[in-house]
Amino acid sequence: MTIRAGLVGLGKIARDQHLPAIARTDGIELVAVASRNAQEEGLNNYPDLDAMLAGEADMDAVILCQPPQVRYQAARQAILAGKHVFLEKPPGATVSEVEALIALAGAQGVTLYASWHSRHAAAVAQAKAWMASRAIRRIDIQWREDVRHWHPGQPWIWEAGGFGVFDPGINALSILTEIVPEPVTMLSARLEVPENKDAPIGAALSMATASGAAVEALFDWRQTGPQTWDIAVETANGSLLLSEGGNTLRLDGEVQIKAPDEEYPAMYRRFVGLVADRAIDADIAPLRLVADAFLCGRHCPTTAFDD
Ligand code: NAP
């Protein structure tokens, strides 16, 4: 069976990644789009999810690519209509929303996929396997990028529930919680919030693995020039460096993997498999760490930022 899917929120990530990835994936076909502002040639276009659900009775799945603040009600509506749901990351604006969706999808017998694209970066699976048998001593995360380059014209990202620098930072936390074979807890956090914004532009997080290894993370949205998405791990038996957001792997300084970004096609293959089994894949571990950083973090005002 080919999954007949409709997509909501025709913005940057929908156009950059979802449309091309769906076109390349066997077992799923995009039939409709719901957008307040845009239209896509060759598909059935609707102004919103209500109209799409009404107009596409035989649609099997809904892909939600809007900002996190508005995704919960849309996901509820789609699940209650009996549709399988693919959520962009982060899966919700709050932990309680995502837990409610998991319960609802279970009760309705439909798939809920809370996608974490960085977990599908080329080197993550090998990093996880390498770390599984080693004693971790320390982990350092540097996630520094230029918000003006990556998020132009996205006011939602600076508003409450938009995550600020945790929008990219949660990608690092999704890799961290995938490759570390034990729970990671948040100890303290420092959140730098521009005086004209609601969400942080920088964050310094102190975490620990259950067996006591320090995990330090720096997220910064003010980095111009070369961008940095690195996770460095020291163990009792060697060191690991994941860079390029998880697409390059070095072990003891030697490059093992350096591959192009194929994260979204991998996620769609996963979604097709989940729908076949009517299974739920919705790990909230990365979102829980972000929530904990906001719970225990010191909120430090910083100079106004114009994006
Ligand atoms: P975006 O370009 O701002 O697009 C989001 C789309 O959602 C908008 O084009 C709009 O679509 C709809 N939307 C915006 N505000 C809305 C609102 N208040 N109510 C209802 N719909 C609204 O953002 P994006 O970069 O695509 O990011 C969307 C999600 O994808 C975020 O959760 C982000 O973390 C995730 N993501 C983004 C990237 C990236 O590189 N940008 C990478 C990975 C994941 P319509 O005009 O069609 O209604």
Image (tube, rainbow, N blue to C red):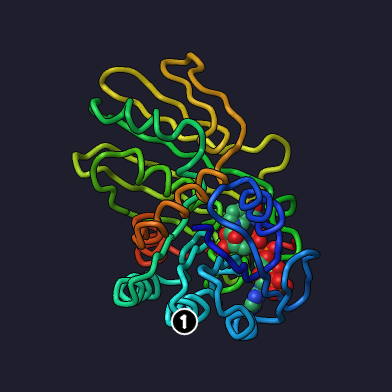
How crowded pointer 1 is (Cα within 10 Å; few <14, some 14-19, many 20+) is rated as some
Closest to the observer, 87 or 28: 28
Tell me what residue is drawn at x 72 percent, y 42 percent. Answer: 224
Closest to the observer, 101 or 146: 101
30 displayed left or right of 59: right
Tell me what residue is drawn at x 39 percent, y 28 percent. Answer: 126
How far across and how far down the image is residue 111, in percent? 39, 65
How far across and how far down the image is residue 19, in percent? 67, 55
The type of residue carrying mark 1 is Ala
Image quadrant where residue 76 sits: bottom left
5 displayed left or right of 98: right
How far across and how far down the image is residue 139, in percent? 37, 35
Tell me what residue is drawn at x 54 percent, y 38 percent. Answer: 245
Tell me what residue is drawn at x 68 percent, y 49 percent. Answer: 20
**Residue under label 1:** 81
Q: Quadrant of ligand 1?
A: bottom right
